Image (cartoon, rainbow, N blue to C red):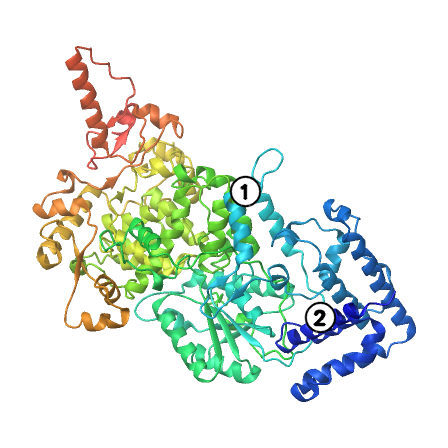
Amino acid sequence: MPPSAAAREDSKVLVRKTLREVLVGREDPEGFFATCVSALGHQETRSQFLSLIQPLSTANGPLHSTLTSIYKEYFSKNEDDELELALALSLLEMKDQQLSTPNQESQPQQPGDRPNQLTSISQPQGSRHTKLADVVVRRKNNNLPQTGPWVKANRPQTNQETELQKSTHVDKYEKETPGTSQNKSGSISKQDTVEESDKMMDEGDLNPSGKPTRKMNRRQRRKGARQQVVGLPCSPSALPPVLLWFRRDLRLWDNPALTGSLEVGAPVIPVFIWSPEEEEGPGITVAMGGACKYWLHQALSCFSSSLEHIGSHLVFFKANGSSLHTLKELVKETRARTVVANAVYEPWLKERDDVVVSALQKDGIDCRMFHSYCLRDPYSVSTEGVGLRGIGSVSHFMNCCRQNPGSALGAPLDPPASLPTPAHWPQGVSLGTLGLARMPRRKDGTTIDWAANIRKSWDFSEEGACARLEAFLNDGVYRYEKESGRADAPNTSCLSPYLHFGQLSPRWLLWDAKGARCRPPKFQRKLAWRDLAYWQLTLFPDLPWESLRPPYKALRWSSDRGHLKAWQRGRTGYPLVDAAMRQLWLTGWMNNYMRHVVASFLIAYLYLPWQEGYRWFQDTLVDADVAIDAMMWQNGGMCGLDHWNFVMHPVDAAMTCDPYGSYVRKWCPELADLPDELIHKPWKCPASMLRRAGVVFGQTYAERIVTDLEERRSHSLQDVALVRKEFGQYVDKRSGCDLVPLPPRLVSQALGLSHRDGGVVTEGKQFLLPVITRMEFKHQQEDPDADAASNPYNAVLKGYVSRKRDETIAFLNERDFTASVMFEGVQRKERLESNHRRIEGLPQPPAPRGRARRTPTAKDRFSVVPGGGVSSVR
């Protein structure tokens, strides 16, 4: 039956609408021609197509020529080819009619219910008819009913459907979320997806058993996305390409810049520009140490492979003078009119990006920077309505974010199924030319492969990040709240390197953490700590090398290079410290608790400057982050905004993180045969025990580089008290807290002025703010010469145990410790119990045999050993 006049008019409206899409770059010429064949029919397309595109001959000559050549090639085929294509189209129309019936829509799809008839038709490889039929299939599949933005990714696919996806070229983001748009400032408008996602987050999808199925849907979603492989390359387009500038956002999932480049509707050229001079910035930042460079090399290799799977690839460049100069050369070579990137927040890199954007915009280039590296843009966080009291703490920062909320986080973005490719690619260099993974050589010419253990310990790909996140949310997250400090068990996520290099977005991590069955607040607060570190770095650009508290710049740090070298190599003679430093050197990582242990030992006991620890961490950590490391080492070094209110004891901290010695045995195998109760203090072992274990101090294991820990702590406290007394103008007389000069941005916020006026306000003035100060320091200032033992606020933190965790040590100590306590707390509890029994007239309980008691000759007042071992230790 011939189509009615109304139907023909609707078809022409569809064709004109599609033609507009071609003009703005959202549709390719072949797709437009396939739409004409599908909507108008074979005969009408033959007779009317040339008249439809006639206006393009003057408005857009290249596009008119391309469409004319497609038309001529298509209708130059013989009748057999045309009949073959007509048969394929008719079969698809019949199948669509079946799918459009109510019965078919209401029933779940089963494998084999939807055969792809095109696969049974023999056609020449690479025939244009095959491509057009595939495009028609894509058009018709887009009309299928969908209930949400993720239905297509979650729906089980037949093998034939998967093959069909492989042979089509379409932007998944535009296909599945047509309401998505993104403006130049980086804000995301994705109403349909956000509303659906929020509904899933708040209510959850329940299976018949009543259990939430979010995690299964998440895994299916990822699996379905990975199966989409592009087989049809984009046809060359007359539109100028988009330069997609990658820095530390090496992922396909939830990448706003990647999605923003697709919205331009032009070919995309992914580029990576390596400029080591710009990465380092001013001062001594060590922004890219050896371990970080090696990870970056491996991550770039994996990410380039991921781009190849969606029909594109990453082009590498070594900056010729500067990134701006390289970008200008690329713009000139490719004739690109748009540059897209995700923002970075280190102050020197932010200044670099501002210069790049300004210079390119003067040349008429559209530059778009998107926000994704942190949950909150650190330059947008304000203290208005909160004040400055408690600044530096994560609680104050979270209050600032709640009081001054920015744009909504929104739902994570899906990866694209393909990237439109340009007609001509720029000439780049090989990844090895960047020199990121260059290994040193010995005099005989052999290579020193110091990264061998790092390669064995990590999967550097985006898939590896997702797999590690899934493994953590399925297992380790349940122990994270109480046992994240354990070094002898994998109770932490190990996701920090993937976050640093952008292989996992913080929004995706938060989204999955909230969707997990176990949602520990402690784990979610880690992302707030990360944002806090970047906020501090934007306020204090010299955070990596300059102490924030002026008096502490005058501290008399030790200059013993032998102690520093022993700490770096894990030869201090303290097994817990040595094990952590060896793990760092071999794998490029250690958990947060162990970082506190080794930092406390370097600062409080070796009395070496915190900058030395910061520089070593930056060179050896695979997750070396300038903002986080600088904030942590400043706080540990007594001069940050938020003093640590504790000092980790190098022996007693093992009660928390390694009560059975498993961690020490793994990284210090020379001590493996020592018993659990003495493995963390081998110097207390009798000579016979050392002989049986094969331990010889100074040969198989290092001697302790310092022996009197209490004396070292006292010296450290006395020096702090002296500098605070010398610089009394930086100490608040009323509260005893340290005073820190405020940066102009905070001053302008506090006075209610704009940031631009801040420089005028602070000209010739210095605004001081009281900040959190350790009670131990306040008390020490009253008597600077007192030793640490006499200070009632002694901050040395003893490890703690519970009966559920470690029944052996709990039995020996006869106490169920529920928090981090010092030995004085135990004595106070015993005294209260004894007084109660005396008042009530009850007999005193006999001391149990084998009770733990202090060693009479120990200089360390917190040393506790089992009672049965005292005679042998002597």
Residue 856: x %, y % from top left: 19, 29
Q: Nearer the viewer, residue 663 or 69?
A: 69
| Residue in the picture at 25% in, 44% down | 646
Q: Is residue 346 above or below residue 569?
A: below
Q: Amino acid at mark 1?
A: Gly
| Residue in the picture at 84% in, 60% down | 91
Q: Nearer the viewer, residue 573 or 810?
A: 810
Query: Which badge, 1 or 2, comes first in the chain's sequence?
Result: 2
Picture quarter with the C terminus: top left
Q: Secondary structure at mark 1?
A: loop
Picture quarter with the N terminus: bottom right
Can residue 447 be seen by looking at this rendering?
Answer: no
Q: Are marks 1 and 2 in contact (CB under 8 Å)?
A: no
Q: Secondary structure at mark 2?
A: helix
Residue 327: x %, y % from top left: 49, 79
Q: Amino acid at mark 2?
A: Leu
Residue 407: x %, y % from top left: 42, 59
Left or right of 636? Residue 85 is right
Q: Nearer the viewer, mark 1 or mark 2?
A: 2
What residue did someone put label 2 on?
Answer: 14
Q: Is residue 348 above or below residue 330?
A: above
Q: Residues within 10 Å of mark 2 (few under 14, many from 20)?
A: some
| Residue in the picture at 50% in, 83% down | 329
Left or right of 853? Residue 40 is right
Which mark is drawn over residue 386?
none
Q: Nearer the viewer, residue 239 or 229?
A: 239
